[in-house]
Amino acid sequence: MSGTLVLAGGGKMGGALLAGWLNKGMGGADIIVVEPDSKTASAISEKHGVAVVEIVGDLDADLTPETVVFAVKPQSMDDVAPAYGGYAGPDTVFLSIAAGRTIAYFEDKLGPEAAIVRAMPNAPAAVGRGITVAAANGQVTGQQKSRCDGLLGAVGDVAWIDDEGLMDAVTAVSGSGPAYVFLLAESLAEAGREAGLPAELSDQLARATVAGAGELLHQSGDSATRLRENVASPGGTTAAALEVLMGRDGWQALMTKAVAAAVKRSRELAG
């Protein structure tokens, strides 16, 4: 992870990536952040000590970055990406984490000669426990792919796919997935309150249970199915609850419907 890197967007995910790179030993002098929001720009500069400019036009005219990372919202990409077209060529790889924006989209905005990696990280990247799925176009060299793998790996696991068409489902499962888990914690806490628990205690129990179960799943070599079965004694309280949750109109039906809705929206964002 060496050489000049331009990070377009210093928001939550861009900031998480930046922190991960610096924590893994990348030099701050190798990074330039392009961030038009003055408050966010000041916070990045003060916290991380990296150079921050307002717009891409403020970069040195002779700059040839090895990597440009797009970390802006997909809805803003039409205004952002074309400004970086001058860097398209064999010396620069573009790494996008914008949901729904396809490789073809960036080839249209940057030119067919652009080396492009499309990636989908998720929110746990903020604590170094994310997972990212990535796909590359034919212009990306092995060295550039390795570089992007290192950048993404600074905040968690990385998986590469050859079929970019899978990215909509990836977005729906892992990109959006943390929100489903947070909703589980909310719902569990609310159910506890309905069962008579004090609000503060119910929130504490739900938060610790979801976080602890996630860590157990992370550390255990057992499947999620086996771990569930280990908790549920036949005829016990857990089995009674699972009979409801695993019923015909239970979690699986709802989750399948929810993921399908997210896949549909991801495809709509692609245009």
Image: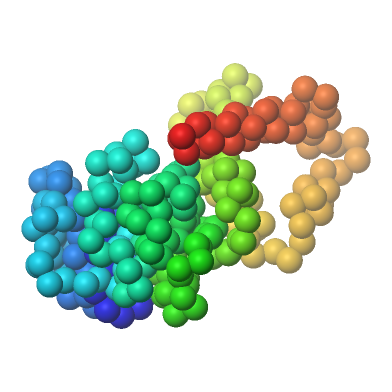
Which of the two residues, 212 or 179, is positioned nearer the viewer here? 179
Which of the two residues, 105 or 7, is positioned nearer the viewer here? 105
From the viewer's perspective, is 15 left or right of 196?
left
The answer to whether any part of residue 127 appears in the image is no
Which of the two residues, 33 or 21, is positioned nearer the viewer here? 33
Q: Position of residue 236 (x, y in %)?
A: 85, 36
Which of the two residues, 203 or 74, is positioned nearer the viewer here? 74
**Residue found at x 74% / y 33%:** 252
Spot the residue most to the front.
112
- How many marks on residues? 0
Residue 42 drawn above or below residue 159: above
Display coloring:
rainbow
Q: Position of residue 165 (x, y in %)?
A: 61, 48
Q: Position of residue 85 (x, y in %)?
A: 26, 57
Quadrant where the N terminus is found in the figure: bottom left
**Residue found at x 37% / y 41%:** 74
Q: Position of residue 100 (x, y in %)?
A: 47, 42
Spot the residue most to the right.
234
Residue 72 drawn above or below residue 24: above
**Residue found at x 77% / y 22%:** 249
**Residue found at x 38% / y 49%:** 108
The answer to whether any part of residue 76 appears in the image is yes
Residue 97 drawn above or below residue 64: above
From the viewer's perspective, is 237 left or right of 87?
right
